[in-house]
Amino acid sequence: MDGSSNSILYILIICFIAALIISCLSSQSPERKGKEGELDIVHIISKSIRRGLHGYILHNLYIPKKDGGTSEIDVLFICTKGVYVFESKNYAGWIFGDDRREYWTVTLPAGRNWLGFKQLEKHKFFNPIWQNNSHIGNLRNLIGRSVQIESVIVFSNRSKLKKIANKSDTKIMQTDMLKYYLSSIGKKRQDILTYREVDNLYNILKPHVDTDGEKKKQHMMYIRRLKSNPKRCPKCGGNLVLRTAKKGSNMGRQFFGCSNYPKCEFIKNIK
């Protein structure tokens, strides 16, 4: 084989390796990881159904909101025990959070600095309890407020729930605990919905599943518009209105409060 043939072979090998690296990197995109987390939840719930827990799984569900937008629910499970709304967080790293704070933190090791000391990389993400409560609020507007709905946040097994302060009713767990949670529901909880009521709820919600990607597209356009409006409450989606503290150490200080107060007590301080 002459020199030109060797050069061509080397170029082909380099191109193949580069394509392989790009493929691996794209498979690790945040969106891909998010979908993998959701599918893990769907798979575990499917096993529970096969074991006798009657119900339906709805994935990629877009619930209409009063302002014309939609609320995206990762996974929803309807069964005779109630309605369960799952928010998937497929993160790797240490998770720190508080149900009263707007943002939580995921911390990852980031190698060592030039002195040899370990470095940590921190990223903030929106409070998943607030996020799922907002989804559930919109869901109640569609199916009624008499239906019992439970909020469940599921973190990846690649994460560690390092310090979570949670006094809310929301259940927080890792993926490997989900099967035990569902098993407990099946064995210990009484039926609160009949088979017919479960079927009726499924028929109401099924049209809101994104089957062709169009609902996802419309939802992303809505999210971009929402982010351009800084006076939108991140906790419930209501409007933020300018208010003035009338008592306490902050008396006379202005802040943004949610228009849905006292139902929603979100406050955004003016810096």
Image: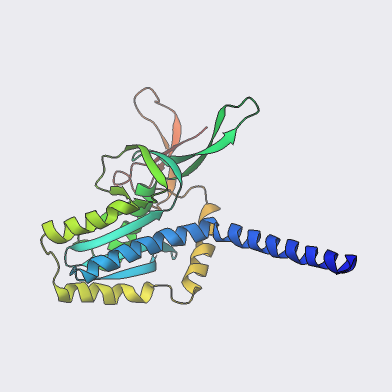
- Image quadrant holding the N terminus, namely bottom right
222 lies above or below 247: below
**Which residue sits at x=62%, y=30%?**
113
Let me know if residue 73 appears in the view: no
Q: Between 156 and 192, which is closer to the camera in this rendering? A: 156
The front one of 20 and 32 is 20
Could you say which quadrant of the image residue 12 lies in? bottom right
- How many numbered circles are shown? 0
Q: How is the image coloured?
A: rainbow
Q: Residue at x 20, y 72 (%)?
A: 198
Q: Residue lying farthest top? A: 249
Between 17 and 75, the residue placed more toward the observer is 17
Is residue 160 shown above or below 226?
above
Residue 31 image offset from top left, x and y in percent = 51, 59
Q: Which residue is the extreme one toward the right?
A: 3
| Residue 41 in sight | yes
Q: Residue at x 24, y 63 (%)?
A: 83
The picture quadrant where one finds residue 135 is bottom left
- Residue sitting farthest toward the front: 1
The answer to whether residue 179 is left or right of residue 68 is: left
| Residue 111 horizontal side relative to residue 153, left or right | right
Image location of residue 67, percent across then percent down: 42, 62
In the picture, measured across the screen, residue 60 lies left or right of residue 151, that is right
Say which quarter of the image contains residue 55.
bottom left
Q: Is residue 9 above or below residue 246?
A: below
Q: Residue 134, percent across and down?
A: 35, 54
Q: Is residue 264 above or below residue 27?
A: above
209 or 17: nearer the eye?
A: 17
Q: Residue at x 54, y 64 (%)?
A: 221
